[in-house]
Amino acid sequence: MLTAEQSQSFWQAPQDTNPNRIGGEFNKVAEVIIQESESLENALRRFKRKVQQEDIIKEIKKHSFYMKPGEKRRAKEALSRKRLRKKQRREAD
């Protein structure tokens, strides 16, 4: 039989020490190292490009609110219909 202390430590989840991991998912971290004789504007431009390439903003918007499974399905179907219409327009031209 376990004592109260043992059972409490038994049921505790292991603590994750990785600072880039929150809520079971890895957070994407865009990092730009400013080189010597590089202007801040150039470094900021590189940072913005890196954020855009890694789709960080897209992921944040995606997880900013909860969508019910049915809503996700309808949105996915609507996007599929939109792509199909666009493809058909291009083929018609």
Image (tube, rainbow, N blue to C red):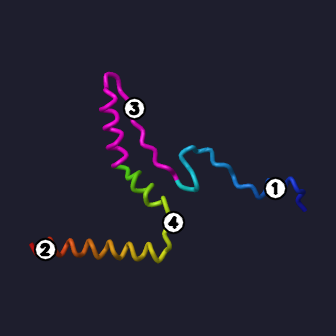
Q: Nearer the viewer, residue 2 or 26?
A: 26
Q: Residue at x 70, y 55 (%)?
A: 13
Residue tagged 1: 8
Cβ–Cβ under 8 Å for marks 2 and 3? no
Cβ–Cβ under 8 Å for marks 4 and 1? no
Segment tinted magenta in the rendering: 26-52
- Say which element carries label 4: loop
Residue tagged 2: 91
Badge 4 or badge 3: first in the primary sequence? 3
Which amino acid does the dot numbered 2 rest on? Glu
Badge 2 or badge 4: first in the primary sequence? 4
Cβ–Cβ under 8 Å for marks 3 and 1? no
CA–CA distance between discs 4 and 3?
Answer: 35 Å
Q: Nearer the viewer, mark 4 or mark 1?
A: 4
- Say which element carries label 3: loop
What percent of the width, then of the height, locates residue 28?
A: 46, 48
Label drawn at residue 33: 3
